[in-house]
Image (cartoon, helix red, strand yellow):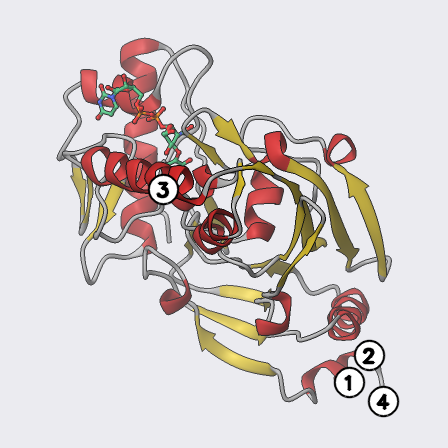
Amino acid sequence: MGDWETFVAQDWVETDVALAPWTTYKVGGPARWLATPRRLGDLEIIGRAAVERAVPVVVLGRGSNVVISDAGFPGIVVRLGDSFGSMRWEGGEVVAGAAVSLPRLARTAVAAGRGGLEFFVGIPGSVGGAVHQNAGCHGRETKDVLVSASVWDLRRGELTSRSVAELGLGYRRSDLTDHEVVVEARFATTPGDPEDGERLLREITRWRREHQPGGTLNAGSVFKNPPGDSAGRIIDALGLKGLRRGRVYVSERHANFFVAEPGASAADIKGLVDDVIRRVAEATGIVLEPEIRFVGGFDEEGR
Ligand code: EPU
C-alpha cells in the first residue's frame, strides 16, 4: 500500500468534514480530509501521505484565531486527538500536550499552587497554538514562561526538542512553519499561593468580560497592534465601531474584535477586514496586519 492509501484507510481520517463547529467564528466550509491523530506514529502517516501527494496541511488548535474560507480547505486538516491533551509535572515545570486548552493549563497550575501561568486563562486557545503564535495577554507572552517545545516535522518525519530561544518567538509570531506540529510544551512556574492565584484568575476573567465582547462569535484581536499603538484604539478613533459587512460587524465594546452573527460567512469577515485596512490606511497611513489567520482560498471578493 502506498503512503496515501495507508492514510485514507485510517479510522481517524474522515473526508469532507465541516470545520465551522471547530472554530470560534463558526464560519467556513469543509476540510477535504480531517485527521485526528492519537500518537506520533499517526503524524508520521499524515506527513508521508501529504508529501507523496503534495497535499497542503494545516493544523487546527482550538480554532480561536482562524477564519476558514467558505470553500473550505482542499487539503488535510489536523486536529490533535485527546491523547495530546495530558499534563504532567516535573519539579516546578509543567509539560502540557499541545491540545491542552490554555484556560485549563492556567487553572491546573493555580490548583497545584504554582504561579506564572494565570494569564493563559484569558486566551481561549490551545498550548500548540500559543507556541506557534506566542499568544499573550495582560503584558505576558508565551515566551515569558515557555522553556521548550517538542515539535514534529511532517516533512522530515522527526521529532525535535527546541528551546524557547530556538523557536524564534516574537510579537504574535514564531519561526515555526505549517509543517511543524507542536506536540507538547514545557512551562516554567513559580511557587504560588492557590488563593492569590484564584484571585488573579478572577481579575483577568472580569477584565475580559468588561473590555472584550465575550459570549459572541469572535476570534479575539483581528489585527496585530502596530508598534507603539493599539489597533483597537485606532479603529475606534476613526468611528468605525458598528461598521458592518453582511453579518459581521466591528464590536462596539472593542474595535479590534469583529463579531459574527449566526449565518455569517468567511467572505463577510474577509470583506470587513479588507475594508477596515483600507479605511485605516487612507486616514492614517498605517497598514494594519491581521493577527487572525485566513485558511483556504480567498479571492478578491473574499470567497
Ligand atoms: N481602545 C480604544 N477603543 C477600543 C478598544 C481599545 O480606545 O475600542 C484603547 C483602550 O482604551 C486602551 C488601548 O486601546 O487604551 C489598548 O486596548 P486593550 O487594553 O484592550 O488592549 P489591546 O492592545 O487592544 C491586547 C491584545 C489582546 C489582549 C489585551 C489584554 C493584541 C493585538 N491584542 O489588546 O489579545 O487580550 O491586549 O492584554 O496584542 C488577541 O491577541 O487575540 C487578544 C485578544
Q: Position of residue 47 (x, y in %)?
A: 77, 66
Tell me which numbered mark, 1 or 3, is placed earlier along the sequence. 1
Label pair 2/1, CB-CB below 8 angstroms: yes
Mark 3: which secondary structure? Answer: helix
- In space, the residues marked 3 and 4 are separated at their CA atoms by 51 Å
Q: Position of residue 205 (x, y in %)?
A: 29, 42
* Front-lying residue, 205 or 38: 205
Residue type for callout 4: Met
Q: Is residue 289 visible?
A: yes
Q: Residue at x 73, y 35 (%)?
A: 164
- In space, the residues marked 4 and 1 are separated at their CA atoms by 6 Å
- In space, the residues marked 2 and 1 are separated at their CA atoms by 5 Å
Q: Find residue 6 and name its label.
A: 1
* Front-lying residue, 107 or 242: 107
Label pair 4/1, CB-CB below 8 angstroms: yes
The residue where tag 2 is placed is: 3
Judge left or right: residue 11 versus residue 227.
right
The residue where tag 3 is placed is: 201
Tell me which numbered mark, 2 or 3, is placed earlier along the sequence. 2
Q: In which quadrant of the rendered view does residue 42 lie?
A: bottom right
Please state the quadrant of the image where ligand 1 appears: top left
Q: Position of residue 105 (x, y in %)?
A: 51, 52
Judge left or right: residue 135 versus residue 287.
right
Residue type for callout 2: Asp
Mark 4: which secondary structure? Answer: loop
The residue where tag 4 is placed is: 1
